[in-house]
Amino acid sequence: MKKMLLNVLMVLAVCTGVELSAQNMPLKIAVIDMNRVFQEYNKTKINEAKLKKQADIYKEYSNQLAQSLNKLRQEFIKLRDDSQNMVYTAAERENRRLNAQEKYRQTAAKEAELREYNRERQKQLRDEYEKLRSSILQDISNVVTEKCLAEGYGLVLDKSGRTLNNIPFVVYSSKMLDITDSVIKTLNMGQNKPAPQPVVNKKQEGR
């Protein structure tokens, strides 16, 4: 989920609220690292954790469905094989054949249920992510716009963005032009801090 949250499109933000006089005042430009803003905004971290928790719940239920499906498949295979085993009488083989047909229908229904469940849950997570991303982008835009109005910036460029040729959009910028830290600080004012992530023991992780 984290990669997903950091997949930010190149941003070219123009602060339209600032009126500049071309004769008396040069265009004031700033740069921002949108990747860092996304990463270090507490709202991103908190909601990312919520999305991961929800995804884990969906995955757990999906695994339960998959286990049920596997059990049905094994039962079907056994009944099918028994229906062809000459050890049993013709009547017993016929009974197993009919049971195998029913088990096959149950297996097909469980497969469809699993596919539909995964499809719906994936769509739900995508929709929730898009809402979150839109909300975060709006928060960032509001803070950047307020900073433009207060400090007279006429143009803000995303230095983490890249061109279609995968070349950095901003080749060079002075540290004095960078408003990333200031924007992050403003965004996190009054925001709850994300819960600390549990430390994973590498030995346990490799099991």
Image (spheres, grey):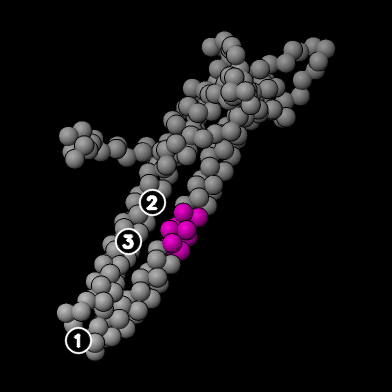
Q: CA distance from mark 3 to mark 2?
A: 16 Å
- Amino acid carrying mark 2 in the image: Ala
**Residue 66 in picture, x, y percent from top left:** 32, 61
Q: Residues within 10 Å of mark 1 (few under 14, many from 20)?
A: few
- Amino acid carrying mark 1 in the image: Thr
Indicate the quadrant where residue 64 lies: bottom left
Span of residues in magenta: 115-124
Residue 75 within the magenta-colored segment of the rendering? no
Indicate the quadrant where residue 149 lies: top right
Mark whose residue sits in front, 2 or 1:
1
Mark 2 touching mark 1, by CB under 8 A?
no
**Element assignment for label 1:** loop
Q: CA distance from mark 2 to mark 1?
A: 50 Å
Q: Nearer the viewer, residue 107 or 149?
A: 107
Residue ID for mark 1: 89
User: Label for residue 66?
Assistant: 3
Residue ID for mark 2: 55
Provide the major secondary structure of the magenta segment: helix
Any part of residue 31 in sight:
no
Q: Looking at the image, tell me whether mark 3 or mark 1 is earlier in sequence order.
A: 3
**Element assignment for label 3:** helix
Q: Nearer the viewer, residue 2 or 167?
A: 167
